[in-house]
């Protein structure tokens, strides 16, 4: 029998994300997460025991995100209609598929219509690397890398954790992901305070990243994508990001990675793939199809599992 309490919010929330994305005027819980993380970092990331204080912060914020929502939804079980509305909104807020595609498209549009400077500026909003000297090929490469990596982080992983534990587990994952994006850096300021945040994010994405790569090659029936996943997926500096990037590089028969500047420091990243072809807008359109189709198949898989 279909589990309506899981599937109806999943389908409504997924549809809302596809229609609305992340409107800037709409309050978003991830902004609250960011404010909380910044508050703890400001007050605790100094003096002695920074590693312990950072680990305690990460464990507390992730644990409380799950516990508070678990208790809330247990209460809402007595009010089925309110429960369905709240869970649907939770799924909507937990996904970032429409926004990922839209922000990536803005970069490609700027590059095609307004030139390099406009595209570099637009790209800087969605990547951590220095964009000030990138050429057109490097800009398109960065967009596709971001689409592949964030398909895992922002779409498939949240759906995966929703399937395992509903909205509470989805948002525990989102808190862990936000922690990593804010304090999970290996620099002087965060290498001690953010060590657990970075490792927790790596652990939580182990399965979703590989699942994402599988979905990507499945929706394209790409033998090249499969070969790239096995050949290049483990070569990325991240234990997870390389798998969806390798899958997309194989599907498009292009090459990702290589040296890039992050926060003023040259990082010599390995190449993902071996085809040095010129990336085009057509490749971006195929990446959009891969993104949407992978997400739809993931939702369909969850529906089948709960049927």
Image (cartoon, grey):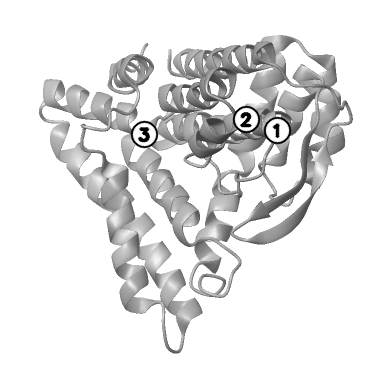
Residue marked by disc 2: 148
Place of residue 129 in the rendered image (x, y in percent of width and height, measured from the top left): 61, 48
Residue marked by disc 3: 94
Residue marked by disc 1: 245
- Give the numbered dot on residue 288: none
Identify the image quadrant of the C terminus: top left
The residue lying at 53 percent from left, 60 percent from top is 184
Q: Residues within 10 Å of mark 2 (few under 14, many from 20)?
A: many
In three-dimensional space, the C-alpha distance between marks 3 and 1, rounded to whole angstroms, equals 22 Å
Q: Residues within 10 Å of mark 1 (few under 14, many from 20)?
A: many
* Total labels drawn: 3
In three-dimensional space, the C-alpha distance between marks 3 and 2, rounded to whole angstroms, equals 18 Å
- Mark 2 vs mark 1: which is more N-terminal? 2
Q: Who is closer to the viewer here, 298 or 124?
A: 124
Q: Are marks 2 and 1 in contact (CB under 8 Å)?
A: yes
- Mark 3 vs mark 1: which is more N-terminal? 3
């Amino acid at each position: 029998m279909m589990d309506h309490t899981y599937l109806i919010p999943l389908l409504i929330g997924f549809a809302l994300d596809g229609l609305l994305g992340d409107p800037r005027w709409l309050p978003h819980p991830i902004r609250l997460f960011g404010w909380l993380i910044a508050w703890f970092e400001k007050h605790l990331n100094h003096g002695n025991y920074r590693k312990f204080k950072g680990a305690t912060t990460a464990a507390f914020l992730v644990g409380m995100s799950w516990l508070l929502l678990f208790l809330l939804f247990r209460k809402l079980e007595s009010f089925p209609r309110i429960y369905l509305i709240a869970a649907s909104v939770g799924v909507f807020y937990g996904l970032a598929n429409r926004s990922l595609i839209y922000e990536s498209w803005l970069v490609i549009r700027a590059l095609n219509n307004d030139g390099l400077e406009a595209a570099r500026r637009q790209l800087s909003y969605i990547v951590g690397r220095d964009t000030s000297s990138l050429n057109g090929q490097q800009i398109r490469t960065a967009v596709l890398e971001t689409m592949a990596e964030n398909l895992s982080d922002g779409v498939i992983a949240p759906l995966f954790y929703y399937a395992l534990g509903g909205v509470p587990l989805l948002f525990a994952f989102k808190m862990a992901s936000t922690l990593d994006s804010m304090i999970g850096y290996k620099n002087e300021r965060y290498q001690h305070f953010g060590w657990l945040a970075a490792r927790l994010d790596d652990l939580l994405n182990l399965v979703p990243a590989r699942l994402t790569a599988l979905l990507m090659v499945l929706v394209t029936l790409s033998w090249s994508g499969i070969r790239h996943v096995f050949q290049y997926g483990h070569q990325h500096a991240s234990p997870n990001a390389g798998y969806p990037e390798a899958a997309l590089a194989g599907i498009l028969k292009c090459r990702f990675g290589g040296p890039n500047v992050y926060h003023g420091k040259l990082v010599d990243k390995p190449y993902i793939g071996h085809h040095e072809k010129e990336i085009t807008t057509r490749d971006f359109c195929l990446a959009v199809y891969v993104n949407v189709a992978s997400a739809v198949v993931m939702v369909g898989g969850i529906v089948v599992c709960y049927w």
